Amino acid sequence: MPKNNAAQRVNISSGGAYESVFGYSRAVRFGKDIHVSGTCAPAGHEKSDAYAQARAALEIIEKALGEAGATAADVVRTVVYLRDVNDAEDVAKAHLETFDKIRPASTLIQVSSMLRPWQKVEIEVYAQLS
């Protein structure tokens, strides 16, 4: 008999415009694992630098983690997408402010574009509850 995985799955929404258009959740908790979708700074950050955009994205991520019953301390991996690798230091500063003592595994990737032309950084995280 197949397992009923529906009881283990919790979808978390941040109310972002693309969640219903694209059909995704900001985060999904499945048992002890939490996957947070790639997250960019929201509208209103069109003129923000990469540091401010990364901070805004990390605030959204931390809120989603909280709704999933986790904190930044539970993050085991991050993936950071940058449109311009010259912004790496600014984004690293924001990442360090959140994850300095935690030290998750991390990957930094330069991409050619983002969904909106003003977006400079997108961050996704993976967390695991003990």
Image (spheres, rainbow, N blue to C red):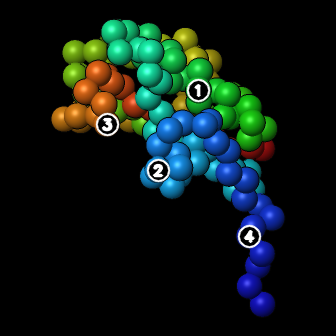
For disc 2, the neighbor class at 10 Å (few under 14, some 14 to 19, many from 20) is few
Residue depicted at 58% across the width and 42% down the height = 26
The CA span between labels 1 and 2 is: 19 Å
Q: Looking at the picture, which amino acid does disc 1 mark?
A: Ile
Is there CB contact under 8 Å for labels 2 and 4? no
> Whole-percent x and y of residue 80?
39, 31
Disc 2, SS: helix
The CA span between labels 3 and 4 is: 32 Å
Of callouts 1 and 2, the N-terminal one: 2
Residue depicted at 47% across the width and 43% down the height = 18
Q: Residue 47, labelled with which disc?
A: none
Q: Which residue position holds label 3?
A: 115
Residue depicted at 64% across the width and 27% down the height = 62
Q: Which residue position holds label 4?
A: 5
Q: Looking at the picture, which amino acid does disc 3 mark?
A: Leu
Q: Is residue 89 left or right of residue 104?
A: left
Of callouts 4 and 1, the N-terminal one: 4
Of callouts 2 and 4, the N-terminal one: 4
Q: Which residue position holds label 1?
A: 60
Of callouts 3 and 4, the N-terminal one: 4
Q: Looking at the picture, which amino acid does disc 2 mark?
A: Val
Q: Nearer the viewer, mark 2 or mark 4?
A: 2
